[in-house]
Image: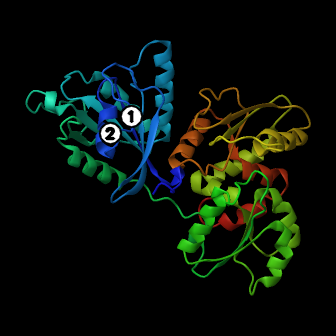
Amino acid sequence: MESTPRANRLAIAFFGRRNVSKSSLINALTGQEVSLISDVPGSTADPVSKSMELLPIGPITVIDTAGLDDEGELGAQKVRRAKTILNQADLAVLVCDASNPDKSWEAEWLKTMPSRGGRVLVVENKADLAAGSAAQGDWLPVSVPRVRVSAASGEGLELFKDALVALAAQSPAEPSLIAGLFPRNSLFMLVTPQDPQAPKGRLILPQVQVIRDILDHGGLVSMADFADLESQIKSLARRPDLVIVDAQVFGRVAKIIPEDWPITAFSIIMARAKGDLHPLAEGARHIDRLKPGAKVLIAEACTHHAMKNDIARERIPKLLTEKVGGPLNFEVLAGNDFADDLSSCDLIVCCGGCMITRGHFMARMKKAMEARVPMTNFGLTLAHLNGYLDRAMAVFKNDGSA
């Protein structure tokens, strides 16, 4: 379970005011001391994550956040970080104090959920302190599930778990990366150059995920480094149903393989799986309309030590500058955070998103669409800049994503 990538785990985030015992509830749910427990208001600062198995769902990520009513300058920073988690969560658990009759704050917070596309479960904690079995009241819409628990005594914890499982079951299934578009026994030829930034002794995550998807759907895999491409082609007993390559060698591979062989890139497959492929492809075509001086936000979803010729900090900026014919203003963000204000951006170029969930990636797309800023990803950008975007997208022509 611990080896399951975070991007493949359901993200369940806990929100609420200070001192509603969110941390105690998470510790009771996981059976571990995931979060620091204190009677001091605002003791949770940065979001705290814990991986666990929630049967029958499987691997999940549980996230504890700071109180959304925190105060002061530091409190405002903690609230901002907590709210970024709301856009990343597949499920939101709103924890409130069962003994506090004032639910006005929770009622207001719930109003933001439909616009964010999230599913929410309300948990009235501290049931042991509530007098009798107080009525639900009219603050909570009947469509929102609610359970009453006591993290201190364990009362209602099983009902809470059952409610989480029921809500999680409503989560849309992750789409097949690629093999689901093809019948069983289809042959996939993978070209995977191992550059210095690839993890030592391992394949990069998109390659691993594509291989697993192919195997899960009864497909066949032929795989080689670019240096061995011609030998790989000669070894094939039949024409591959699809050639999948690292975007950075697409052009060189396309010149070697026959023109009638369908071909795409790992990062374009990720664009389809993590986001909405058609708008992302249009975002790449928007590059043609950029002018010198335009602002380009480059957003990575993970953090890593940037080496020489880094794709986000050197390669893509260099190619975009050459394409536009003049200097551009680049901003590079890495990690879970996304820019609060996108109004000054002319283009957003995201990574493939292999380290985040589809819901997290789609939240970024939604924010870009609301700001009316075109968004694309690394692979689609490279495809367009090198003149092969249409060929790389052709395989998705009839599946509704392009």
**Circle 1 is placed at which residue position?**
35
Total marks in image:
2
- The structure residue drawn at horizontal position 62% and vertical position 68%, both measured from the top left corner, is 211
Amino acid type for the residue under numbered disc 2: Asn
**Circle 2 is placed at which residue position?**
27
Quarter holding the N terminus is bottom left
Up the image or down, 268 lies above or below 31; here it is below
- The structure residue drawn at horizontal position 48% and vertical position 23%, both measured from the top left corner, is 78
Position in image of residue 22 (x %, y %)? 33, 32
Up the image or down, 186 lies above or below 39; here it is below
The part of the image, by quadrant, that contains residue 317 is: top right
- The structure residue drawn at horizontal position 71% and vertical position 45%, both measured from the top left corner, is 283
SS under mark 2: helix
Contact? badges 1 and 2 (CB < 8 Å): yes
Up the image or down, 273 lies above or below 339; here it is below
The part of the image, by quadrant, that contains residue 250 is: bottom right
Circle 1 Cα neighbour tier, 10 Å, few/some/many (<14 / 14–19 / ≥20) = many
Amino acid type for the residue under numbered disc 1: Ser
Position in image of residue 183 (x %, y %)? 58, 79
The image's mark for residue 364 is: none
Q: Is residue 86 left or right of residue 334?
A: left
Quarter holding the C terminus is bottom right
